[in-house]
Structure formats: structure tokens, C-alpha cells
Amino acid sequence: MRVAVVGAGIGGLVAALDLREAGCDVVVLEGADQVGGKLRVDDVGDLRVDVGAESMLARRPEAVDLAARVGAELTHPATTSAAIWTRGALRPLPPTVMGVPADLDALEASGILAERPVPHAEPVPDDDVSVAAFLAPRVGREVVDRLVEPLLGGVYAGHADRLSLRAAAPQVLALGADPLAGAAATRATTRTLATPVFAGVVGGVGTLPQRVVEHGDLDVRLRSTVRAVRVDDGVWTVSAGPVSAIETYEVDAVVVATPAPATARLLAEVAPPAAFALAAVDYASMALVTFVLDGPIDVEGSGFLVPPVDGTVVKGSTISSQKWAWLGERAGDRTVVRASIGRAGDTAVLHRDDADVAALALADLTSAYGGLPPVLATHVQRWGGGLPQYDVGHLGRVATVEAAVALVDGLEVCGAVYHGVGIPAVVASARAAAARLLAR
Ligand SMILES: Cc1cc2nc3c(=O)[nH]c(=O)nc-3n(C[C@H](O)[C@H](O)[C@H](O)COP(=O)(O)OP(=O)(O)OC[C@H]3O[C@@H](n4cnc5c(N)ncnc54)[C@H](O)[C@@H]3O)c2cc1C
């Protein structure tokens, strides 16, 4: 079977790898001039670091299995203690389940909230609601504002008032009618697990895509933006490349592994209901600013998250050279720290130029960390349309897409917009798409 995979993010590459290993003749068409999508390493001064995703959930098997499959060296964070920058100080993040406190004494000691939350039970609704609509009556608005928002923001760059409980925070739904009691019980069972929660890759998670390409000896065509996908009598025609030199590929099947706006455009003719549902998905834009600093910083832990109510430019920060031992070794006496900026609907600062964005980020980091060594190198990576927003009703939209795609022989979709934005979920989505295609 000849297959064209559209998009060389980790989703498209993993689908291509599975199809190729099953004996298919695969071509991967990528619009950018490099593979990886949101997984990317770049040079900041003389250090090569992740400037996109940097960590993978290790309590699901898919990402760590992929790393092992392609020969990447896995590692785990050297420090997992994180902080919330709120109410004028860095405060230790107490144990939570996606921001729902699991230890009220630790929460009280942290000083993150003005008042200790009072557990409250209410029946779980059958229909989809926002994370905030579910949690605020049960745990209090302050927990939502100062804990759930920063943690959800760290994953989706979105807002608890819009994100779907069922699609974006199923672990919160699983806490049941009394989420504070549920979180405490969950912690009691998971704290004894020996497996680390997160994993990274020595050299950066952003090195994984190229490893996938090399492992599968994949035929990837860069600078090949796919402009149209058509099917006629079981033969698919994919048109790609610059408008002045469009190339067409005739194949038996197509896997579309692009973000929702591109997928919606490409499916408009072949699966209109899917295109319509995908066009309704909003995306958050953001920027990651990475600094190499000339010296150590006097702060322990891996960084901090910020509640949006605090009104800072920086939404979160990772002290990368403390979090990842491989980077700490390469950095020596220097510190690598990064800041994330921008959230769904909160992008004004992203309209400024790189120098301004970096200066604003540095001002916030200096204030949060209480002073910083001089900056040796700065890198601004913009992620326009970086993260899909799983707003209320998302699962219904995804069901519509999947039902419409299933009716079209030789068509599959995968990627971050369907069943989870994290790397393991995207890998799972890609492997499932490849398996469905092979089974048809
Ligand atoms: C800043 C940031 C930090 C993140 N951090 C983490 C993290 O630490 N851990 C984690 O698990 N997840 C993280 N995520 C989420 C995760 O990285 C992404 O959800 C995931 O990598 C998306 O993979 P994908 O293959 O679905 O899509 P993408 O990575 O978006 O890849 C899609 C590819 O399709 C290409 N494309 C688009 N249109 C066309 C077209 N018409 N023709 C051809 N090619 C096209 C794009 O250029 C791109 O290469 C982060 C996301 C962002 C934005």
C-alpha cells in the first residue's frame, strides 16, 4: 500500500514508522523546513536545548516505549519540586491532582490560598461542563484560580472556565462528587508507585523526531506544504509544495497529521462534516523564551507556574539545567532557564517583537527568582497556534470527525487535537490511526 502522511510532527512520524514497518510505501509531506512540529531543539548560545516540548508523561507507556524503540536515551527529572509564584512569593506546590489539593495541611503551609478549602460533595453531572463549573462549587473558586488554572495552563495554555472537564481533565472527573476527598484518596494510592511521573531524553525531547526518521529510514519531503487532498475511484491525489512548483503524489491512502485548521482545509472536500467540526477548535498561541545565565541561581527545584489572576506576563518557568542532569552537566556553572508566555485569548504580549518579549520575560523571572546572574544568550521561540483547546463539547466534535473519517476508505487522521495533547497521547493516536489503516 502506498501512503502519504501529511505533517511530520511526532504524530505523523510515528504513523509513518508503523506503516513502513508493516511494509507500506510511505512518503511524509511536511510544510516546514524541519521535522518534529512542536518537538524541536535549537542552539541558545553554545547549548542545544529543547525550545518546544521538554518532558513526557512516563506513567503512560507510549512515549517511553517510542524512545526505547528508536534508541533515544531516557532520563528522569533530577528535581521534581515545583512552585507556584503567587501572592508575592515562590511557594512550594503541594501535592495535587491537576490542581485539586490532595493534602490540605501542605496546602495551608504553602500560603498559596488565603483560606483553607472546605470539602463539598455534589453529584457528578452527566453532560460535559467546564473544569471550573465542576470544581468551583465543590472546592471553592480560590482553588480553581490559584491551583487548577496554573496546572491546566501548564498543559493546555487554556482556561478552566472554557476547558472541558471530560476531554481536558478526565483525572479531575475521576475524583468524583467530592474532589478534595477523591484527590486525597488518589494520592494515598499513587505516592507508593515507584515509576517516575515524567521522563525526558538526553539531548532533548526535540531530538526524538529525527531519531524516528532515521530509525524508520523514512522518506520525508520538507518544504512540502500539502495544499489539497482528493480521492477519485480509490486513488488519492495529494498536491504539495510551493505554489510555483506543486508536486502531486498518487497513493492508496492518506494520514492527515496536521493541526485542526490545516486538517479542516484539507478534508473540506473529502470529509465535510469532519472539516466543519475541526474548524471549530480554537488554538492557544504562546512563546517560550530561553536564557543562558552566567552563574548559578539560588533557587531549588524545577521552576514555577503562575495563576493568571496574578496578572504576570510569564505563565510558568522551568530551570532546565536543574531539572535535567544532562543539561546541567553541559551548562557547567551556567543556568538555563525558560519562561512560557501567552495563553488562549491572552496574546497581546505576543504581538511585540522578540526583544520586548524577552525583556518582559526577564523582568518577571528576575522578580520571581529574586535576582538573576547576567544573561549570556537569549532565544525566543514562538508557537503560534501551539495547543488545541479542548473546550466544552470537545469529545462530541472528535466523535463527529472520527465518524466522518471512518466513512472514507483510505483516510485517517491523528495528532494532538483528538485524544490528548501530550506526547504519549499523540503517539497513541498515531499508532491507532496506522493500525486502523492496516486493518481496513
Ligand atoms: C510550547 C509547547 C510546549 C509543549 N510541551 C509539552 C511537553 O513538555 N510535554 C508534552 O507531552 N507535550 C507538550 N506539548 C504538546 C505536544 O508537544 C504537542 O501536542 C505534540 O507535539 C503535537 O504533535 P502533532 O504531531 O499532533 O502536531 P505538530 O507537532 O503540530 O505537527 C504537525 C506538523 O504538520 C505540519 N503541517 C501543518 N500543516 C501542513 C500542511 N498543510 N502540509 C504539510 N505539513 C503541514 C507542521 O509544520 C508540523 O510539523 C507542548 C506544546 C507546545 C506548543
Image (cartoon, rainbow, N blue to C red):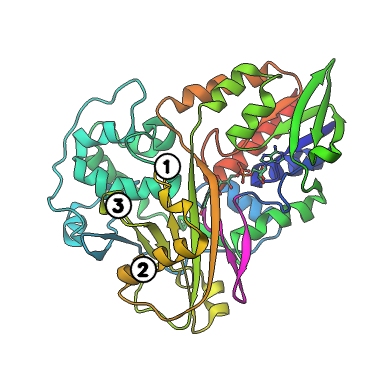
Q: Quadrant of the C terminus?
A: top right
Element on which disc 3 rests: loop
**In this view, the mark in front (3 or 1):** 1
Q: Is mark 1 within 8 Å of ligand 1?
A: no
Tag 2 and tag 1, C-beta contact below 8 Å: no
Give whichever of 295, 25 is nearer the camera.
295
Mark 3: which amino acid?
Answer: Pro
Mark 2: which amino acid?
Answer: Ala
Name above or below for residue 128 compared with residue 180: above
Q: CA separation, marks 3 and 1? A: 14 Å
Q: Earlier in the sequence, mark 2 or mark 1?
A: 1
Label 1: few (<14), some (14–19) or many (≥20) C-alpha neighbours in 10 Å:
many
Element on which disc 1 rests: loop
Name the spot of residue 4 as percent of width and height, x first: 79, 35
Give the number of the disc on residue 163.
Answer: none
Q: CA separation, marks 2 and 1? A: 22 Å
Label 3: few (<14), some (14–19) or many (≥20) C-alpha neighbours in 10 Å:
many
Q: CA separation, marks 3 and 2? A: 17 Å
Name above or below for residue 278 compared with residue 288: above
Residue that mark 1 sits on: 344
Residue that mark 3 sits on: 307
Q: Specify the segment rendered in magenta.
A: 38-57
Q: Is mark 3 within 8 Å of ligand 1?
A: no
Tag 3 and tag 1, C-beta contact below 8 Å: no
Residue that mark 2 sits on: 363
Q: Left of 277 or right of it: where is 18?
A: right
The reply to whether residue 438 is in sight is no
Name above or below for residue 237 compared with residue 154: above
